[in-house]
């Protein structure tokens, strides 16, 4: 069937900056992309509808990996909001929308908060757990906190109506946490997490004990991290502010095999963000120079230093 893309829209031309958490008007657009054809050259994307809200600027959105589709419902969409919360909406299917091109305002179906008295700053990123039930969402904040929610909990201490308190919160970085990614797994509860922050570190965490990170590496201002499905490794991308204008997206192992990190994509500008396709095993990065680079991840059971085709695995 037709694919649908959610796009976060900025409502003014003012520079985006991290500041104290606060509400404000925001907009999420939904576009019909047509089918995924191999040959390309399909129909042009069409704007279906917009979702207006008062939760502040949205830093990122993520669909529920699976199981969110019902009759009349396309899926579940989570958003990292500027008021320091994660909001989840049930998005209707495109054929149930009365008229194309309209803007609707709707309260979130579920609000994931850190507490009324907590000053956590803006929510900068979120990660939806790819495991049985997809019941967990992790989020990071400009205060350095990382939070994990269990959306299936029945505890009256954590759930009040559609508002949910976290099951786990800890200070992961001394600066803002710019990215995080949960390790996909077969357990009901996620076990591992990778985070990166403005304190120039990326860290691997065991969620059963977050007192000390499994591994910590200090190199540059991290702009994005993604856990590589099926292996104990993650991809890390950087801003160029500390690296004299030259950055490298690296693949780094958690420390279990003691293998060193390996650069896979070289850039001459800062990387704005990256994403991972679990279907085709590829990493895509977008840079401040306007580049979109796709890299096909090689098998992780072999040392990448001996891969002669590493340069042929990326395309611009």
Image (cartoon, rainbow, N blue to C red):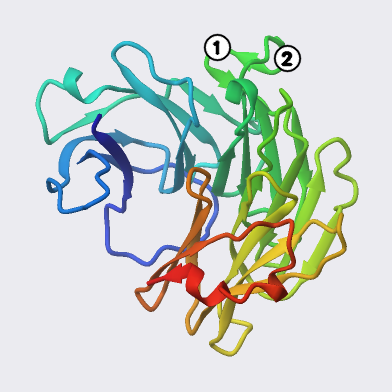
Residue 214, numbered label = none
Residue wearing tag 2: 157
Q: Is residue 37 above or below residue 293?
A: above
How many discs appear?
Answer: 2
- Which residue is at the front of the view, 93 or 305? 305
Residue drawn at x 61%, y 60% as measured from the top left: 298
- Which residue is at the front of the view, 222 or 260? 260
Neighbor class of circle 2 (other Cα within 10 Å; few <14, some 14-19, many 20+) is: few
**In which quadrant of the rendered view does residue 183 lie?**
top right
Residue 176 in view here? no
Residue drawn at x 37%, y 36% as measured from the top left: 54
Q: Is residue 156 above or below residue 300?
A: above
Residue drawn at x 21%, y 53% as measured from the top left: 40
- Which residue is at the front of the view, 163 or 208? 208
- In x, y percent, where is residue 280? 48, 48
Q: Is residue 17 above or below residue 127?
A: below
Residue wearing tag 1: 161
Label 2 close to label 1 by CB (< 8 Å)? no
Residue 29 in view here? yes
- In x, y percent, where is residue 58? 42, 46
Q: Is residue 115 left or right of residue 47?
A: right
Q: Quadrant of the N terminus?
A: top left
- In x, y percent, where is residue 162? 52, 16
Q: Quadrant of the C terminus?
A: bottom left
Q: Is residue 285 left or right of residue 130?
A: left
Inter-mark Cα distance, 2 to 1: 11 Å
Q: Secondary structure at mark 1?
A: loop
Q: Secondary structure at mark 2?
A: loop
Q: Is residue 280 above or below residue 68?
A: below
- Which residue is at the front of the view, 199 or 284? 284
Single out the residue that lies furthest toward the bottom.
244
Q: Is residue 51 left or right of residue 218?
A: left
């Amino acid at each position: 069937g037709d694919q649908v893309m959610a796009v976060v829209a900025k409502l003014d031309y003012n520079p985006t900056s991290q500041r104290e958490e606060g509400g404000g008007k925001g907009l999420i657009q939904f576009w019909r992309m047509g089918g995924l054809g191999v040959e390309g050259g399909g129909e042009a994307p069409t704007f279906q509808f917009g979702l207006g809200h008062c939760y502040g600027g949205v830093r990122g959105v993520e669909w529920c990996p699976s199981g969110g589709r019902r009759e009349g419902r396309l899926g579940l969409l989570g958003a990292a909001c500027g008021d320091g919360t994660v909001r989840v909406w049930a998005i209707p299917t495109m054929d149930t929308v009365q008229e194309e091109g309209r803007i609707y305002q709707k309260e979130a179906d579920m609000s994931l908060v850190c507490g009324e008295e907590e000053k956590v700053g803006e929510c900068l990123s979120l990660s939806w757990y790819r495991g049985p039930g997809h019941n967990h969402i992790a989020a990071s904040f400009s205060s350095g906190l990382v939070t994990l929610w269990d959306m299936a909990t029945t505890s009256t201490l954590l759930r009040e109506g559609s508002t949910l308190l976290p099951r786990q919160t800890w200070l992961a970085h001394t600066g803002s946490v710019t990215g995080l990614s949960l390790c996909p797994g077969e357990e009901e509860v996620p076990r591992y997490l990778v985070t990166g922050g403005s304190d120039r570190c990326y860290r691997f965490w065991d969620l059963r004990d977050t007192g000390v990170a499994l591994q910590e590496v200090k190199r540059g201002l991290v702009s994005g991290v993604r856990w590589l499905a099926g292996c104990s490794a993650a991809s890390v991308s950087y801003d160029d502010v500390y690296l004299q204008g030259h950055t490298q997206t690296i693949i780094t192992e958690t420390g279990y095999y003691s293998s060193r990190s390996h650069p896979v994509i070289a850039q001459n500008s800062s990387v704005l963000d990256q994403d991972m396709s679990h279907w085709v095993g590829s990493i895509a990065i977008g840079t401040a120079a306007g580049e979109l680079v796709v890299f096909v991840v090689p098998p992780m059971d072999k040392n990448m230093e001996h891969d002669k085709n590493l340069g042929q695995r990326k395309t611009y």
